[in-house]
Amino acid sequence: MQKLALHYNNLLKGSFELKKLNFLFVFQVNCPGCFLYGIPLVNKLYKEFQKDISFLGLSTAFENFDLNTAANTKLLVNNNTIIGHTKKALKNQGFDEYPYTIDFPIAMDKIMNNSEDLEKAILHICSINPNYTSFSYREQLLFKAHVKAYFEKLEIISMTFTLNQLKGTPSFILFDDNYEILYHKFGHIDSNELIAQLKSFVKTLS
């Protein structure tokens, strides 16, 4: 079972305490679907499951790096300010700012900024490759060099998003107190299906 590599600096809203069950919502501020669909869904889940599940919303950036920033995330958290494509989408619905509360804690994905972070990232990607340990020493060196070259081509590396090889936003991840990923979905998912999954895990681990 794959472990979640969760990296963030200071929380921008609320507090996060690791529990037996934890729910991670990964979003970008320049992601209309995250706001029209993702946040209302997570608010609903938070209201129903917060006693049994610890929640964290993680603002990240894998594109539009000038918009998907910590500064714009702070504006969202403090003033309900929206930007970019998100602002355009909500303006079409008659809103100049985000019209809903964000009920769950929010943090910003950690940006890789030194050689120590890079080395940890390379080792992590190697560790989640199921064939890595069966490679010869030379093959392992070549694979590590390939991963390093991939990282060095990226303009900005958001560590949680990149190390977990997420497909995009919104992403929804349920994990336990050992950071083992129990459930992972990307994009639009049926809320009833997700609620049923969470109830099942809560019942199993209670």
Image (spheres, grey):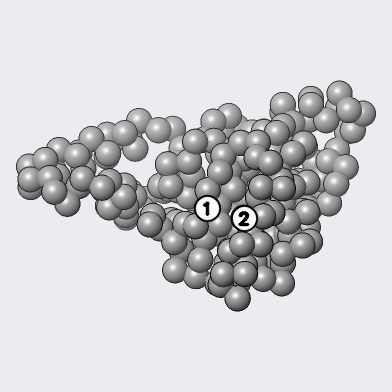
- Residue 16, percent from left and from top: 63, 67
Residue drawn at x 7%, y 42% is 138
Category of crowding for the residue at label 1, using alpha-carbon neighbours closer than 10 angstroms: few (below 14), some (14–19), many (at least 20)? some
Name the one closer to the observer, 40 or 160: 40
Name the one closer to the observer, 112 or 48: 48
Name the amino acid type tagged 1: Tyr
Quadrant for residue 67, please give it. top right
**Is residue 183 in sight in this rendering?**
yes
- Mark sitting on residue 197: 2
The residues bearing labels 2 and 1 have C-alpha atoms spaced at a distance of 8 Å
Quadrant for residue 28, please give it. top right
On screen, residue 88 above or below 65: above
Q: Earlier in the sequence, mark 2 or mark 1?
A: 1
- Residue 140, percent from left and from top: 14, 44
Residue with the most extreme bottom position:
206
Residue with the most extreme right position:
94
Residue drawn at x 7%, y 47% is 137
User: On the rendered image, what quadrant is the N terminus found in?
Assistant: bottom left
Residue drawn at x 62%, y 67% is 202
| Mark 2, secondary structure of its residue | helix
Q: Is residue 22 left or right of residue 34?
A: left
Q: Are marks 2 and 1 in contact (CB under 8 Å)?
A: yes
- Mark sitting on residue 183: 1
On screen, residue 53 above or below 147: below
- Mark sitting on residue 106: none
- Residue 6, percent from left and from top: 48, 57
